[in-house]
Amino acid sequence: MSPFRALVREEVDLLIDWAAAEGWNPGRDADAFWATDPRGFVGVDVDGQLAGGGAVIDYGTLGFMGLFIVRPEFRGAGLGRRLWYYRRDLLLERLPPGAPLAMDGVKAMEPFYAEGGFRSAHDQHRMRLVATHDQVSPHVRALSGPVGSLGQYDARCFGAHRPRFLSPWLTQDDHRAVAYLDDRLRGYAVIRPCRSGYKIGPLFADDVGCAHALLVALLAHVPPGSEVFIDVPDANAAAMDWAAELGGQEVFSCARMYYGRPPVTDWSRVFGVTTLELG
């Protein structure tokens, strides 16, 4: 009998709790994760108890592997390796032939993921900011869902259409979403509470000016002095420079890696990736 199995909804909460214990500082996003792909979470049992798990999300033309974790007492015996390869192969089976996989892997594990066929594209840098309040641009408005051209804009920046993700992500009670609009949509962003402080993701914008206006609007929703984190891709040099000008301090980095040909993604508009757990 295989030790691998699909997870139930409550076990996604458990994975997120384990991630918090590891210092990953996750948000309270299990409902949105589950709504995106209820078949996209698998685990491994040892002696009748869940020992590890992870996400294998089917976005149709792209798969994403994230939230990979094994309980400390079960590490070092090859269980994580078996689980990781099971997840990779299962996700490949779920997708159309030739569809790529993506993941954000910790730097120390990059060689292991490379053995499994993934290639590094760039690094994502978690930058810590301290919230301040400033004048909000009149072009930035509250966003209540994936309306108008937002789905197309998101797909251009993410590399795939993800309607099942966007609706719960934008409308979850403790998430705040804003869009930059003048003659057209020029960007959007979301802020959410985490175990410590807040995370912004995504932060997609046409340019630095729009990105900054979105950031200012989001910071208006949190107390001044709060810790705020953004995962900035170094594939966007302007975003890295902007984060440095804001006084951002790097607290973590990981590698964006792909199995197969990477999807077409407009990284010049990605000032903050959405979530390292689901892309």
Image (cartoon, helix red, strand yellow):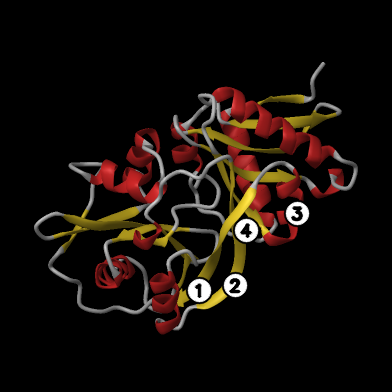
**Tag 4: amino acid:** Trp
**Closer to the camera: disc 3 or disc 2?**
3
Q: Quadrant of residue 47?
A: top right
Question: Is residue 191 among what the camera can see?
Answer: no
Label at residue 32: none
Looking at the image, which residue is at 76% across and 45% down? 115
Relative vertical location of residue 81 with respect to residue 133 in this rendering, above or below: above
Relative vertical location of residue 144 with respect to residue 4 in this rendering, above or below: below
**Tag 1: amino acid:** Arg
Instruction: Characterize the local packing of mark 3: few (<14), some (14-19) or many (20 or more) Cα atoms within 10 angstroms.
Output: few
Instruction: Characterize the local packing of mark 2: few (<14), some (14-19) or many (20 or more) Cα atoms within 10 angstroms.
Output: few
Instruction: Characterize the local packing of mark 4: few (<14), some (14-19) or many (20 or more) Cα atoms within 10 angstroms.
Output: some
- Percent across and percent down for residue 218 are 31, 65
**Tag 3: amino acid:** Pro
Label at residue 251: 2
How far separated are the C-alphas under marks 3 and 1? Answer: 27 Å
How far separated are the C-alphas under marks 4 and 3? Answer: 21 Å
Q: Which residue is mark 3?
A: 111
Dot 1 or dot 4: first in sequence order is: 4
Q: Secondary structure at mark 3?
A: helix
- Percent across and percent down for residue 149 are 20, 44
Q: Nearer the viewer, residue 83 or 241?
A: 241
Q: Which residue is mark 1?
A: 128
Dot 2 or dot 1: first in sequence order is: 1
Dot 3 or dot 1: first in sequence order is: 3
Asked if disc 2 and disc 1 are in contact, CB closer than 8 Å, the reply is yes
Q: Secondary structure at mark 4?
A: loop
